[in-house]
Image (cartoon, rainbow, N blue to C red):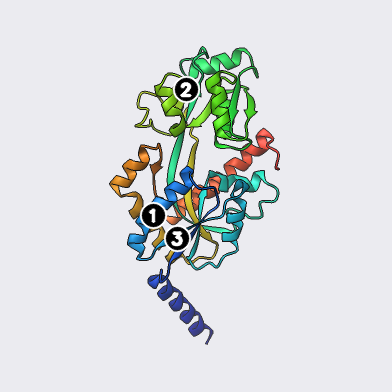
Amino acid sequence: MIRALLLAVLTWGSAHAQSYPVKPVRVIVPVAAGGNQEITIRALAEEMSKSLGQPLLIEARPSSSAIVGTQFVARSAADGYTLLSVSTTFARAATLVAAAGYDPVRDFAGVSLVSRIPQVLVVNPAVPAKNVAELIALAKREPGALSYASSGLGSTGHVAAELFSRQAGIRMLHIPYKGNAQSLADVLGGQVPLMFDQMSTSIPQIKAGRLRALGVTSRTRSPLLPEVPTIAEQGLPGYEDVTWNGLMAPTGTPREILERLRAAVASAVGAPELRQRFLERAIELEASRSLDEYAAFVREEVAAFARLARDANFKAE
């Protein structure tokens, strides 16, 4: 009797997954419209709907540290009809915000990586460093005297600089701002000598000669800045720090449904015109090769940031 019941449940679950989706799928975007995360998932949702046979409806629920939308999806039914668009913040907010109210590993099941966005280390042209080695030497001559700007505690620029400093064996003074626009403005103005910035905002300034690019944070050189070496190839082997975007579902979502969604992401990011359009914005579309690969990636991102926050004494808000 019990075996028959279990078999019936498994059979129903498999059939349910095979017919999925039978209605539109909601994708919660927990950040304000207009940024890379929202633009990317909106374009991918359109492509994914072609292979899924149902529309993916984008629903914005923005809030500080993306917490409101993230909590909403964590409490949603695990049926594949409510998904969460995530970025690097997803793996970090639970460490930085005491009231985050979710566990990124326990409360969610991964669908796929969606994109990677490299950063670039830029300095004001007045800084007497033409490459990473010269910048490190400059910082070592006066420990703590060299400062860098970021858009805030735990931001992508802050973390990239912390990782850089630790691997290079230097100390730099962190100058946090309440957004990227002002931090970039002060580097351009010479009030702060350097920062790790998104390529999309720095490239126009680099090409105009108002900023000098010293290195990119990805594993390989960017086709948008082919003449700029990676930081890893300039004496810091293994260095990498990129912003990433992905898709998550509530924990307990059937694996067959997750795989159906992952395959739709892979099909979407493979569209040549879409890839080129986003590459021009310095966004590299990329899908995970398997559910297990993405789950391991998210776990390591969470653990790595928790270690860094502890070692660097980041304080939870």
Mark 3: few/some/many CA within 10 Å (<14, 14-19, 20+): some
Label whose residue precedes the other's in the sequence (2 or 1): 2
Indicate the amino acid at tag 3: Leu
Task: Residue at 48% x, 46% y: name it.
Answer: 37
Task: Residue at 47% x, 65% y: name it.
Answer: 80
Q: Which numbered circle lies on residue 235?
A: 2
Indicate the amino acid at tag 2: Gly
Of badges 3 and 2, nearer the viewer stands 3
**Nearer to the camera, 46 or 171:** 46
Residue position for label 1 = 265
Q: Position of residue 154 (x, y in %)?
A: 61, 38
* SS at badge 3: strand
Task: Residue at 36% x, 39% y: name it.
Answer: 279
CA gap between label 3 and label 2 equals: 46 Å
Residue 183 appears in the picture as rendered: yes
Query: Which residue, as the protein is rendered here, is positioned at the far left?
Result: 272
CA gap between label 3 and label 1 equals: 15 Å
Residue 166 in the image: above or below residue 267 = above
Label whose residue precedes the other's in the sequence (3 or 2): 3
Residue 1 in the image: above or below residue 236 = below
Of badges 3 and 1, nearer the viewer stands 3
Label whose residue precedes the other's in the sequence (3 or 1): 3
Q: Position of residue 57 (x, y in %)?
A: 45, 60
* SS at badge 2: loop
Is 51 left or right of 239, judged from the image as shown?
left
Task: Residue at 60% x, 12% y: name it.
Answer: 141
Q: Position of residue 166 (x, y in %)?
A: 59, 28
Q: Which numbered circle lies on residue 57?
A: 3
CA gap between label 2 and label 1 equals: 36 Å
Q: Position of residue 221 (x, y in %)?
A: 38, 30
